[in-house]
Image (spheres, rainbow, N blue to C red):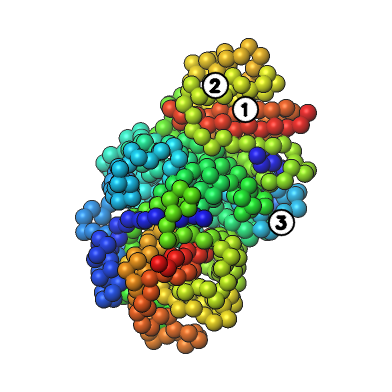
Amino acid sequence: MIYIHAFGIHNVKPEKNPPDLKAVLRTLSGKVYRRIDRFIQLAIIGAHKAAASYELDPETALYLTSGQGDIPVFARVRQQRYLQKMMSKPVDFVNLASNAAGFYIASHLGLNGTNLFLSHNDFPVQMALLLAQSDLELQKQSTVLLGGVDEWFADQELSRKILGVNESTKLGEGSNWMLLKRDSEGAIASLTIEPELLDLSTLKERVALVGAAVRLAFSESLTATVINEIMGLRADHKRFNYEKFCAYYETLPLFALNLFLSRESGELLHIDSDGERYMIMRVGRPD
Amino acid sequence: MITILGGEMLCALGDKPQRLTALRTGISPLSSVKVNVGGKELIYPYYRIDDGSRISDHTIVTGYCKQIVSDLLQQNFTAGPLALDYSRVGLFLGLSAIDYSLAWPIEEAVDSSFVSRCRRERVGGGYYLASLRQTFGFSGPSLTYNTACTSSANALLGAASMLASKVIDYALVLGLELYSPTTLEGFALMQLLADSKARPFAEDRNGIVLGEAVSVCLLSRDDIAPSKWSLAGGVSACETWSVTGTDPSGSGFARVMRGALAKSQVPPEAITLIKAHGTASELNDRAEMRGIEQVFTDIPPYLSLKPWFGHTLGACGVAELLLLKECVDSGFIPAALNSTPLDAEFVQAPLAEKMVIDNGCFMLNYFGFGGNNSSLVVSKAGS
């Protein structure tokens, strides 16, 4: 078990154009950043909300996870190359060819610890948290600032294609962060990531053992049928509905956990799926 | 203790006997690549896996990954892959940030004449590991690392964490770097590419030579699978001097080297050899040497492996570890290649003569864009 000491939410449901983040970032941080793209702005905003008011140890590790990373810049570079027959700008290459977002967050927050950019096709949040949990429990890290960042991309058809979601899925963007430690002192909540990838019957066995007071949240990848089956296991289980506050992006589970922390007390069991297997995360907030 | 059981790779040097021959003779199969720079087509030296397709179609990339994983499993599990509990195998991949699988749908979208084999297929950062999971039936955790040149070194450290915490019993750690026009153009635009060959630590060095590699390393714990080779420890840390460069003082590099020694509980004098990052860029080479000088009172022998098969960026963490391992298992470390005349600023030259050795404690350095620095310590016990 590890502990959440701070969290930050930046969650948006854009309609036609992505909101301008420059002004948001300037207002939040009081700084003007040049040569950074929107994905990096998004990353800094979320990390700032989680950690700027917290006295961070410079050795704090930074784990940034994302479904797709900096797609708009990648698409722009390809467009320049194939349609406009232009060279891309060196700044675009730099922002693409490195974990630039992590670099700028580290600069912003004065960090010089481990700095990772991670991804996973189905469980980007859970896998990054699993690494954080291992590193904290082994005392390889004392504090991990972990965030999930996904940017809304104006080409919605292409976005849906890349994400493998159906045409009716509304897409959003977010930058949601947690400050994690092994120590419970001063913590907001506990967090447990179950490392096993479960089949449905094992998942049901686990959920059936969960107490009535624990709320259940489900990722977008679970079908209504499966959700109904799980909710039907016990009549006293209640659902935590975060979905009305957001549209789809791949690191949404972090938003779900953080929203729970911002609004509720007690425990939350979050269930995610890759279509075949399931992962469980459990957050416990003292009443 | 984290054990290193074996590895496989595809690189410009060919198969294992060919790799060892190249390392013994100092003959490397340098090829070339055309790069469009500002509308002009320039030719740069380049290390390629083969002379086949120059398009890093994601199906070709996936094919390479499956091939080396299949070979590695056959070599290490004589009862066949089914002898493994696949739910206890973790998959880790390091590649530089531009993802080949994303290139296809995006190219198709920007240019309808572009014929893509990727139509409404889930792609993205985790594509390759998802494909391996599907092919082989692995059902343990997996993670893809994009931290530029430290990607697969950091993947090794992540795998070591999950092994040590007993989340998994085996880890397959892959490093992947293949032909990417965007990468080549980016490096060319930044004037980082050499015009002839990689000459790390040499006075007349003039840049990096890029190379391709697909590599995989099998790790475990000594309670599951003992080995003479172990990953004693390592550290990855960020310096915020510049997004593309390093603090010339070498302080960022020194920090991770010191940290790696401390985590490994290895004193500096116990290091047999340093596998330097040695990109052959002046800033990087000099900062690395300054960092080494801050950590070691007596500088151990050192060399860069990049003159043999290029800078394989995201793959170099695993690929260079495996190349070093193959040398030591064959009883030698080659003399440094292309490193004379020595940079006048250096007090000690890289390894001047072949070292006869079949065990030892080795430091492996990896430094990348985004201020990302990593240093590992691996060792091989004597007989």
Horizontally, is B180 left or right of B157 in the view? left
Image quarter where the C terminus of chain B lies is: bottom left
Horizontally, is A219 left or right of B360 in the view? right
Q: Does residue B175 lie above or below B339 as drawn? A: above
Q: Tell me the kind of residue under disc 2.
A: Glu
Instruction: Single out the mark in the foreground, 3 or 1.
Output: 1
Describe the element under mark 2 as helix, strand or loop: helix
- Give the number of the disc on residue A57: 3
Image coordinates of residue A276 in percent, x first then y, are: 43, 27
Measured in 3D between alpha carbons, the distance from the residue under mark 3 to the one under mark 2, in whole angstroms, is: 41 Å
The local crowd at label 2, few if under 14, some if 14 to 19, many if 20 or more residues have their Cα within 10 Å, is few
| Residue in the image at 38% along x and 71% along y | B358
Q: Tell me the kind of residue under disc 1.
A: Leu
Instruction: Single out the mark in the foreground, 3 or 2.
Output: 2
Measured in 3D between alpha carbons, the distance from the residue under mark 2 to the one under mark 1, in whole angstroms, is: 14 Å
Residue picked out by circle 2:
A205
- Mark 2 and mark 1 lie on one chain; the one further toward the N terminus is 2
The answer, for residue B111, to whether it is visible in the render is: no
Chain of the residue where label 1 is placed in the rendered structure: A
The answer, for residue A195, to whether it is visible in the render is: yes
| Residue in the image at 72% along x and 50% along y | A52
- Same subunit: marks 3 and 2: yes
Image coordinates of residue B190 in percent, x first then y, are: 44, 67
Between residues B226 and B313, which one lies in front from this camera angle? B226
Q: Does residue B304 lie above or below B117 as drawn? A: below
| Residue in the image at 53% along x and 44% along y | B166
Describe the element under mark 3 as helix, strand or loop: loop
Between residues B191 and A51, which one lies in front from this camera angle? A51
- Same subunit: marks 2 and 1: yes
Chain of the residue where label 2 is placed in the rendered structure: A
